[in-house]
Amino acid sequence: MTMPAFNRPIRPLPSGEAPLHRGRGAQTNASGRFEPVTRESVDDGWDAAETLETLVTRVTRERPRHLITRNDSPDLGFEQSLNPYRGCEHGCSYCYARPTHAYLGLSPGLDFETRLVAKDGAAAILRRELAARGYRPRTLAMGTNTDPYQPIERQHRITRSALEVLAETGHPVGIVTKSALVTRDIDILAPMAARGLVKVAISVTTLDRDLARRMEPRASQPQLRLDAMAALAAAGIPVTLMVAPIIPGLNDPEIETIMTRAFAAGAREVGYVLLRLPLEIAELFTGWLRQHYPERAEHVLQLVRSTREGGLYDSAFHRRMSGTGPYAFMIGRRVEITAARLGFRKTRLALETGHFKPPRDALQQADLFETAA
């Protein structure tokens, strides 16, 4: 029996060579864990790398039955979330959401960033769910799995359509993104913020443009994210900095600098997540690391293992985000001390739920169906 890719011993990959697919985070398209066979690229000596087709982003539309996902994980700060897209074109090499593409029969590798799914009709579906009898408003988290402001949002505008519904109904929402495109929607977000209905977290992993280009090839450049923070803060929208993920031995020397720059830009809350490598991500990230930073790859992996009980990932609640051991403890204390020195808020801003009013048109339709029945 062929062992699933994420359980096989991680093999050293060729390093120091130019990536096969420029502008993409993953360099392989290995099969997902549910596939009966595994795919593996092999150099057959016919210069295949020179004849590879350019990878273009393909978007499939789906109309889901439900848009709001419930969550009961004890270490997450939200109870429900909304993700407008499956897959993410940002192509972050470390993305913990990559394994979700295996549920579609696709690869967590290149498929995750090139074969995307847009949830059509999101506004109408959201209206129906918010109008459901007994619905209780709680902060809706956007961007918990894939980025709601990834490049295809410019054309599909699903995130914006959902925000329009949330603004109309007075429903609170927390947004997480690493895209400066979020500033496009300041016209919606600023009035929501004035009513205590929204906060925006922007992820900044590095200020090094070269590292960002390699690690997050299609996300906004670091300076653009800081500029977005400043624009949001100037509009009265609460801004949170997410230093996520912190990768030991790669971007952790920048923690204090990132926090200082973000505070100056207007961020007043801060959070962090230690690198997470669940399922297929361990092999994908390790391959990326050996490809781009061969001289420090083993040192980085050794540090990661020191924070994960000797492995590359620990899925235990309350440990998976922050890790364990001396190195993980040191990272946590650095964030805490720097936050206190700069003046970041110690408590999380709670959003208002008392403004919520179910969408009228959806309520009328529900009453009509009940009367007909």
Image (spheres, rainbow, N blue to C red):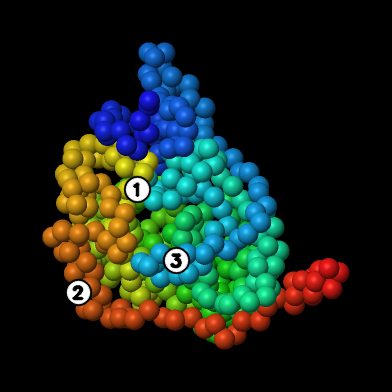
Q: Say which residue appears at 43% left-offset and 45% top-offset.
A: 99
Residue 72 sits in which quadrant? Answer: bottom left
- Which of the two labelled residues, at mark 3 and mark 1, occupies the earlier sequence position? 3
Report the amino acid beneath label 3: Asp
Query: Badge 1 is on which residue?
Result: 278
Distance of label 3 from label 1 (alpha carbons): 19 Å
User: Looking at the image, can residue 16 be seen?
Assistant: no
Residue 240 sits in which quadrant? Answer: bottom left
Q: As drawn, is 372 to the left or to the right of 191?
A: right
Check the picture and name the quadrant holding the C terminus.
bottom right
Query: Badge 3 is on which residue?
Result: 72
Distance of label 1 from label 2 (alpha carbons): 29 Å
Q: Say which residue appears at 30% left-offset and 81% top-offset.
A: 346
Q: In the depicted view, which residue is nearer to us: 80 or 371?
A: 371
Give the number of the mark in front: 1 or 2.
1
Q: Secondary structure at mark 3?
A: loop
Report the amino acid beneath label 1: Pro
Pointer 3: residues within 10 angstroms few (<14), some, or many (20+)?
Answer: few
Residue 161 sits in which quadrant? Answer: bottom right
Q: Is residue 192 above or below residue 319?
A: below
Q: In the depicted view, which residue is nearer to us: 183 or 134?
A: 134
Q: Secondary structure at mark 2?
A: helix
Distance of label 2 from label 3 (alpha carbons): 30 Å
Pointer 2: residues within 10 angstroms few (<14), some, or many (20+)?
Answer: few
Query: Badge 2 is on which residue?
Result: 337
Give the number of the mark in front: 2 or 3.
3
Check the picture and name the quadrant holding the N terminus.
top left
Q: As drawn, is 232 to the left or to the right of 191?
A: left
Horizontal and vertical percent position of residue 3: 35, 30
Q: How many marks?
A: 3
Q: Say which residue appears at 20% left-offset and 54% top-offset.
A: 307
